[in-house]
Amino acid sequence: MDTVKKKIVVDVLLFVDFLLMAISGLTLWLVYPAGEKSGQAGVVFLFDRFAWLEIHHWLSVILIVLILVHLLLSWTWIKINVFRIGAVKNE
């Protein structure tokens, strides 16, 4: 698979992971707010609060890994543009 296809796959995975993280974060914020009795309210929205926390944490780890892969795949572009900006500032 060439680099462009790899970047597209990584970008799509980043987008999906971000959406899932947003959904889990909003669920934790709106359905299971933190407080004295968090997790003991008896409310179950597909999963309990602790399962949502676990999902949210693992999606965060996956997001970090995907960001690192994205940066690695774009490293040549990053180097070229950083040097180009540096060359303009030095003139």
Image: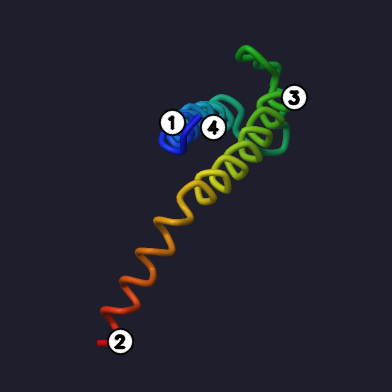
Residue placed under numbered mark 2 in the picture: 90
| Residue at 31% over, 79% down | 87
Residue placed under numbered mark 1 in the picture: 5
What element does badge 4 sit on?
A: helix
Discs 2, 1 touching: Cβ within 8 Å: no
Disc number placed over residue 39 in the picture, else none: none
Three-letter code, disc 4 = Met
| Residue 69 screen position, x and y as percent | 56, 44
Which of the colour schemes (rainbow, by chain, secondary structure, one colour) is used? rainbow
In space, the residues marked 4 and 3 are separated at their CA atoms by 23 Å
Label 3 vs label 2, nearer the camera: 2
In space, the residues marked 3 and 1 are separated at their CA atoms by 46 Å
Examine the rendering and report whether any part of residue 87 can be seen.
yes
Discs 2, 4 touching: Cβ within 8 Å: no
Disc number placed over residue 40 in the picture, else none: 3
Other residues around mark 3 within 10 Å, as few (<14) / some (14–19) / many (≥20)? few
What element does badge 3 sit on?
A: loop
Camera-nearest residue between 91 and 38: 91
Disc number placed over residue 21 in the picture, else none: 4
Three-letter code, disc 2 = Asn
Name the outermost residue toward the bottom.
91
